[in-house]
Amino acid sequence: MVKEIELKKIERASYRFTFQHGLYDILVGLILIGVGFGPSLYGVFPTPLNFFIAETPAIIVYLLGMRYIINPRMGIVRFGEKRKADKKKLMMIMIGSVFITLIALIWSMASDFQSILFGNLVGWLIIGLLLATLPIATIAYFLDIDRMYVYAVLVGVGIPTIEFLKNYMDYSTSTIIVNGSIGIIFVLNGLILFTRFMQKYPKPEEVKKNGK
Amino acid sequence: MVSKTHKDDANFLDKIDKLIHEPARLNILVQLHVIESADFLFLMNRTGLTHGNLSSHMTKLEKAGYLTVKKEFVGRRPHTMICITDKGRVALQKYLETMKHVIDTQLSKQYRKRSEVKTTEDLNVETYSDEDSSKTMSGSFTTNLTKFRNTPSFINLDPLVADLESSHLPLMWLIGMAFISLEMTNLQNQEPNITWLRK
C-alpha cells in the first residue's frame, strides 16, 4: 500500500485529469478550421462578420460541452499555490503574445517589412515559430499538457506550408487545406479523448439508474 | 516467550493510525493532500469509490477532524467543497513516517530476506510540498521563474486568475489570436492603405 504512494505523481495525475476530456483539443481544432475557412468568407461577408461566422461553431461547441457534458462528469477542483502561480505567469504571457501579434500585424502593413521577412519560406517559418509555436509551447509548459507541444509544432509549421502551397494554388485553398488538415487532427484527437472520458466517467445519475 | 523484536514490532504497529490505514480513507486523504479543495464528484472520480462508500469514509474522516466540508458558490451555483484540515495533514504525514519507520527499522534482516520489500528507497515514500514540486523543472529555468514569480503586490491578478480558472480567458485568447491571424491573411492579399506606415 505504501509502495504506491508518490505524492507528486498523484498531484500531477489529478491536474492532468482536468485536461483529459478532449474538449480543449476539439476547441483548438475547430478554431483552426475556422481560420482556414475565414479567407474564403472575406468576399462574401464584411469584416468582422466573417470572423464570427468562422469561429462561432467552435465557441458554441466548447461552451455547451463544458456546461452540459464535462462539468457534470468531472467535478470541481482547486489546486495549490504552485499551480495558481503558474496560471498567473501564463496569463501574463498570453497577454504579451496578443500584444506582440498585434505589433506584427501593424508591421505587416508596411511594404518593406513584408518584402524582407515574408519574401521566402524561411522568413515565414520564423514567423510561424515566433507567433504560433513559441506561445503554444509556453502554454503547454505552464499547463503541463504534453500533447500541446505537438500542436505547437504543427501550427507553426503550417504557416510556411501555406506559403509554399500558394505557388500551386490560390491563397484561400491553401489555407483551407493546411489549417483544415491540422484542425481535423486536433479534433480527431479530442474526440478520442472525449469518447474515452465519457465511457470512463458517466454522470452520477446515469450510474444510479444503471445500478453500477 | 515473546522475543524483544516481536514485542517492539507489536508496540510500534499500535502507533499506526488505524483510521488512515484503511486503503480507501488513505486514498481520500492523499488526494486531498495534494490539492487545495475538491467537490464530491471529483473525489469520486479520482478515488474510484462508489457514492455510498465515499460518503461513509468521508463521514468518519470528518468526525475525526481530518477533513472539512465547505459550502460555497462556484460562479452562481452552490457547491460543496471538501478540503483536508491541518490536523489531517499532520496525521497523514505522521502515518507515512510511521510506516516508513516500521519498514526501515522494525523489519529485521531476517524478515527482509523473507519479504519482497527492501527499504523505503525502493518504496519512494516521500513528502510533498509546493516548494519541492519546483524541483521537477530544470534548474536554470526554475531560478529564472523564481525571479519572475515575485510580482509586485500592487499588481492584483487574482480576479483575472479566477477568470483563467473558469476557462474564459484562454478562450478569449484563442479568439483574439484567431481574429488577428484572419486579419493578417486578409491584409497580405490587399494593398496597404495606411500610407504613413510606408516610407
Image: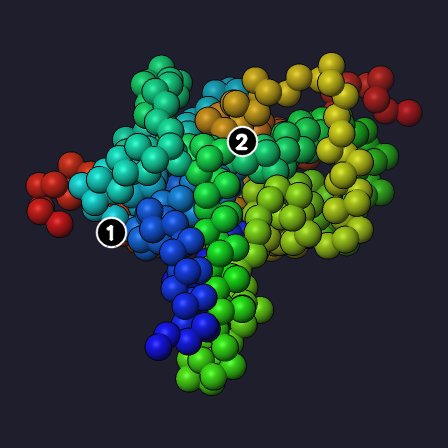
- Indicate the amino acid at tag 2: Pro
Q: Quadrant of residue A77?
A: top left
User: Which residue is situated farthest in the front direction here?
Assistant: B1
Residue B182 higher or lower than B112, as above or below? above
Residue A158 locus on image (x, y percent): 60, 51
> Which residue is the site of mark 1?
A199
Residue A25 locus on image (x, y percent): 45, 45
A38 and B61: which is toward the camera: B61
Residue A153 locus on image (x, y percent): 62, 54
Image quadrant occupied by the N terminus of chain A: bottom left
The residue depicted at 34 percent of the width and 35 percent of the height is B64
The residue depicted at 35 percent of the width and 27 percent of the height is B69
Pair 2/1: label in front = 1
How far apart are the two marked residues, 2 and 1, measured between alpha carbons?
27 Å
The residue depicted at 12 percent of the width and 41 percent of the height is A208
Q: Is residue B130 visible?
A: yes
What element does badge 1 sit on? helix
> Image check: B110 left or right of B73?
right
Residue A196 higher or lower than B66, as above or below? below
What element does badge 2 sit on? helix
> Which residue is the site of mark 2?
B170
> Image check: A199 left or right of B29?
left
Q: Chain of mark 1?
A: A
Q: Quadrant of residue A85?
A: top right
> Image check: A57 left or right of B172?
left
B154 and B166: which is toward the camera: B154
Residue B29 marker = none
Residue A211 locus on image (x, y percent): 9, 47
